[in-house]
Amino acid sequence: MKLRIITAIFLLILTLAFFSFWTDLDEALAAILVFPKRIFFMALIGSVVSYFFRFLRWDYFLRVIFSHQQELIHFSRKDSFLVFTSGLATVVTPLRTGEVLKPILVKQLTKVRASKTVPVVVFERLTDGLAMLILMVAGLLRFRFGTKIFFGSLLIIVFLIFLIQFERAILWLIELPESFSWLKDFYFPIKRRLLNLYSHSRYLAKAKPLFLGTFLGILGWGAQMLGSSLIVANFIESSWSLEFFLICLFVFSFSAAVGFSVPLPGGIGVAEPTVAGLLHLFLALSSAEAVAATLLIRLSTLWFGVILGGFAFKLLNAKISKDG
């Protein structure tokens, strides 16, 4: 985890170096230093509200999986919250692969195999994708910008959800490697995990979990983007308005989609230039203002979550060590 955070910080330094070629970085940093603390605190509140809605989704998905287990599983909301919050630190792993930490922590607390709860993480990301696309729609219709990314992402998500419904096809794909004798012994334990993964994914691929997960995702990311829009509003002369917020929704959701699509920790090095560039393009912020707003937004969202996740992970580790 420490190595991944160091890698993320290194990428952030490279991003700042890139920004220094685009604008006067001293001017941007000066704007950050005089930025109203009250506005930044409100942005942090937006992130906290976002984490709350996304925790509700995580906990709901997890209990859907638990409800289909043969044994009764005791897992408190407090432990569930600590596991979810610990996962916030994993955004600084490439493609958020570090989120397998959450199923591992659940296994340590409940003895439920990680392969049974990994679908929760998968469907968190799928419903995140759907939520982002829905949040992007208003701006997409207005600006006609990023349509290829929008429809490409939508097609991939819909295809994955649709594919899960075809049990015979999935089982055939899972069992296919066993037809090669030289793979059979090696593949057998992997096959069991894949069957677990698929059988539990089907519980979350139903209409109710998908709808509720996407709805909570919209509320969660919408709250965070609302907080971020308050940061941007401080850099423009016109007052905050619904149209302005819709523009911000498009900018942030489009940038998040770009960040998710690259195998870099937290999208660092890609999301920042995208946010700054779109703020400059659509809201006419100067390059220094766009960079200052972007860095404040990433601090109140990405890095704030990483810090909270680190604290939660330490608390949970202490609990697990104490319980033995």
Image: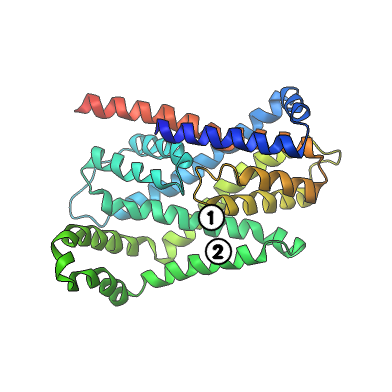
Image location of residue 268, percent across then percent down: 56, 42
- Which mark is on residue 261? 1
First in sequence, mark 2 or 1: give its number: 2
Asked if the residue under mark 1 is in contact with the one under mark 2, i.e. CB atoms within 8 Å, the reply is: yes
What element does badge 1 sit on? Answer: loop
Residue 311, compared with residue 266, is above or below; it is: above
Residue ID at (76%, 61%): 143
* Circle 2: residue type: Ser
Where does label 2 land, which residue? 153
Quadrant of image for the N terminus: top left
Locate residue 157 relative to residue 256 in the image: left or right: left
| Image quadrant where residue 90 sits | top left
Label 2 neighbourhood size at 10 Å, few (<14), some (14-19), many (20+)?
some
In this view, the residue in front, 30 or 240, is 30
Label 1 neighbourhood size at 10 Å, few (<14), some (14-19), many (20+)?
some
Image location of residue 297, percent across then percent down: 65, 37
Image location of residue 223, percent across then percent down: 61, 43
* Circle 1: residue type: Ser
Residue 179, compared with residue 142, is above or below; it is: below
Q: Gap between marks 2 and 1, in whole Å? A: 9 Å
Locate residue 93 relative to residue 294 in the image: left or right: left
Residue 58, visible in the rendered structure: yes
Residue ID at (56%, 56%): 131
Quadrant of image for the C terminus: top left
In this view, the residue in front, 291 or 299, is 291
Image location of residue 221, percent across then percent down: 57, 47
What element does badge 2 sit on? Answer: helix
Locate residue 182 relative to residue 237 in the image: left or right: left
Residue 293, visible in the rendered structure: no
Residue ID at (34%, 61%): 201
